[in-house]
């Protein structure tokens, strides 16, 4: 089967800035794909390349097997949910949702019926007569979603759509988006800088840094087996151990990633070091301990209700040797 | 700092404000008063008697009708030109980033900051050099220079509030450039254009200086303000001028008031739509 979106050595330069630098990527049909990275890493430019708001400086883009270069946004079977929603303030919610059908010349009763269906899909039935300014942030987000979905796109692009919502609403929308995507079977391409969001929702994640994809894979892949230091650091938080340190503890002579939750305090098997507690951070479900051993800082997560440690105390840290994951230097 | 005592202005300030308002508006009242006087050669106070016959006299005079028609025509065409060019310029300056953009913006606004006499002289020289005969069209061109500014300023402010994403959203949903302009851009800038257009019309309608320099000499090239100026020099049927003045006040005041309310309302709706 043809991939829904395919990038072949795509670059997009703005003057001397390489916003997207030689990116190759295949996004499968029906996949929930996250583009994850810090701001300015090129993920949003990639999204805009798919939408057609940007043209590649070099390389080749295919959408559903068809060449995308030179095709204007309004001729692509791709729709976008914008970060600020970009609803039309002078139209009712129903006319906003029906806009894509209206410009295609679909009759008023027909497009309004379709728009009503799309609104119930996002749990906003009966909101059609309101103006966008009368809705809450979460409701506007749903309208933006309905406005894109009503066109039945091959690919739905979401540009940090949950960024403006508060934490509770964001978690709820994560679940709803995921369910919606499963039910509709549409390919979702989702841009976010929130690694938790990417891990919890996506089938696959591509991690961007400086315009390049540094690693792509399932959430488990990128979390458990980071290939480079940047990924270990950016996805979740990790102890990045230098080669000498790793070797001394029985690991490979390479940079290794060690997740804080794999470390136990006090007793355990495998590698072990003595360390002095620098600081203790209570975080609810876990307590994070930052300790120092011979100049190397190590962070460990201890489950809530576990042992109590205080700053300045000497403790022993243990982890299984398999928890140390070797990486490239990059 | 606001104090509770501060909600009443001092008496001296109140008096000063009243005096200021009287100074501004009393002469206007005098125009209304002397439109009805029976004395036609001087402004004797109080007027010796009252009559409405001057309205009939104005109605009968073809030269007044010619001037009114010329003024309306010039103002309408100049406004139309300004609407098209001003909107295009504002769209370009607000959306694109290019070298010297701020200077270009300044150049657009300059004609309204320059003394009218400079605009007038330069246009007159330019028309002479290019061998363009003076006519209603040269007046239109002269007026368009400052009409563009008001349209440009109004449209620019609105374009800046129009989120770039909204235009992209429209394209994303399948609308081509024309559909996007018609369904998204125009509805969002319409009230600003109406306000700008009305202001431009009012400015053009009572313009004297640039008109003096860009109109020919014949009777057919007298706009209404020029006609009034000529009329004041010749002391015959003075109240006729006042009747025409009332007409001008009505024609310019109504659109300016409407423009004021339109833009004020636009700020509310524009701000709420984010």
Image (spheres, coloured by chain):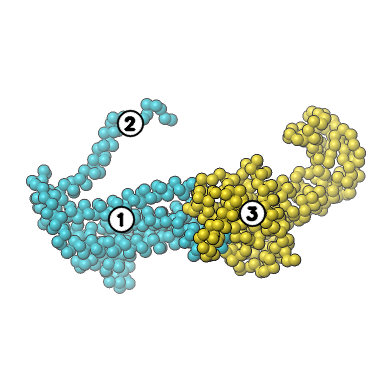
Above or below, A313 against A209 in this view is above
Q: Which residue is mark 1?
A: B202
Whole-percent x, y for residue B110 in the image: 38, 57
Kindly identify which chain the residue marked by label 1 belongs to: B
Q: Residue at x 77, y 51 (%)?
A: A219
Q: CA distance from mark 3 to mark 1?
A: 48 Å
Using the image, tell me which numbered label, if any, was put on residue B9.
Answer: 2
Front-lying residue, A44 or A123: A123
Residue at point 76% right, 56% down? A216
Q: Are marks 2 and 3 on the same chain?
A: no
Extreme residue toward the top, this view = B5
Please state the chain letter of the residue tagged with numbered disc 2 in the rendered image.
B
Camera-side residue of B169 and B40:
B169
User: Would you place residue A251 above or below residue A284 in this image?
Assistant: below
The answer to whether marks 2 and 1 sit on the same chain is: yes
For disc 3, the marked residue is A158
Of labels 2 and 1, earlier in sequence is 2
Chain coloured yellow in this rendering: A
For the point 68% across and 66% down, the residue is: A64
Q: Which chain gets the cyan colouring?
A: B
């Amino acid at each position: 089967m043809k991939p829904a979106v395919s990038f072949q050595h795509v670059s997009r330069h703005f003057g001397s800035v390489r916003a997207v630098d030689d990116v190759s990527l295949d996004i499968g049909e029906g996949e929930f794909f996250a583009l994850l990275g810090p701001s300015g890493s090129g993920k949003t430019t990639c999204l805009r390349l798919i939408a057609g708001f940007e043209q590649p400086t070099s390389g080749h883009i295919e959408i559903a097997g068809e060449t995308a270069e030179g095709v204007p946004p309004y001729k692509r079977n791709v729709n976008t949910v914008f970060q600020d929603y970009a609803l039309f303030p002078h139209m009712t919610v129903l006319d906003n949702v029906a806009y894509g059908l209206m410009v295609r010349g679909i009759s008023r009763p027909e497009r309004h019926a379709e728009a009503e269906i799309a609104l119930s899909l996002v749990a906003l039935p009966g909101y059609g007569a309101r103006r966008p300014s009368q809705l809450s942030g979460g409701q506007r987000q749903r309208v933006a979603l309905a406005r894109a979905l009503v066109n039945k796109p091959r690919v739905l692009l979401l540009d940090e759509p949950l960024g403006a919502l508060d934490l509770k609403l964001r978690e709820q929308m994560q679940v709803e988006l995921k369910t919606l995507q499963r039910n509709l079977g549409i390919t979702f391409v989702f841009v976010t800088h929130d690694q938790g969001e990417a891990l919890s929702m996506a089938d696959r994640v591509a991690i961007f840094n400086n315009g390049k994809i540094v690693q792509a894979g399932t959430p488990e892949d990128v979390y458990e087996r980071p290939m480079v230091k940047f990924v270990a650091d950016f996805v979740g938080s990790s102890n990045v151990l230098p080669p000498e340190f790793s070797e001394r503890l029985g690991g490979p002579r390479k940079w290794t990633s060690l997740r804080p939750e794999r470390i136990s305090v006090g007793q355990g098997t495998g590698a072990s070091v003595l360390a002095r507690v620098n600081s203790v951070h209570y975080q609810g479900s876990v307590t994070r301990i930052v300790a120092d051993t011979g100049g190397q800082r190590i962070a460990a997560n201890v489950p809530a209700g576990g042992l109590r440690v205080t700053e300045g105390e000497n403790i022993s840290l243990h982890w299984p040797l398999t928890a140390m994951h070797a990486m490239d230097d990059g | 700092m606001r104090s509770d005592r501060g909600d009443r202005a001092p008496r001296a300030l109140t008096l000063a404000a009243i005096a200021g308002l009287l100074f501004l508006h009393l002469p206007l009242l005098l125009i209304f008063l002397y439109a009805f006087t029976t004395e036609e050669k001087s402004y004797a106070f109080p007027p010796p008697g009252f009559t409405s016959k001057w309205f009939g006299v104005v109605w009968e005079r073809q030269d007044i009708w010619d001037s009114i028609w010329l003024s309306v025509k010039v103002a309408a065409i100049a406004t139309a030109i300004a609407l098209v060019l001003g909107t295009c310029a504002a769209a370009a300056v607000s959306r694109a980033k290019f070298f010297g953009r701020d200077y270009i913006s300044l150049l657009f606004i300059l004609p309204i900051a320059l003394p009218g006499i400079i605009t007038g002289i330069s246009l007159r020289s330019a028309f002479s050099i290019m061998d363009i005969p003076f006519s209603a069209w040269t007046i239109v061109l002269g007026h368009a220079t400052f009409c563009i500014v008001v349209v440009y300023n109004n449209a620019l402010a609105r374009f800046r509030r129009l989120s770039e994403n909204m235009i992209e959203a429209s394209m994303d949903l399948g609308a081509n450039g024309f559909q996007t302009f018609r369904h998204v851009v125009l509805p969002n800038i319409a009230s600003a254009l109406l306000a700008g257009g009305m202001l431009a019309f009012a400015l053009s309608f009572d313009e004297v200086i640039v008109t003096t320099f860009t109109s020919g000499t014949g009777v057919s090239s007298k706009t209404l303000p020029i006609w009034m100026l000529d009329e004041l020099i010749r002391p015959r049927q003075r109240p006729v001028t006042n009747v025409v003045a009332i007409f001008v006040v009505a024609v310019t005041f109504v659109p300016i008031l409407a423009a004021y309310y339109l833009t004020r309302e636009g700020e509310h709706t524009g701000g709420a739509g984010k």
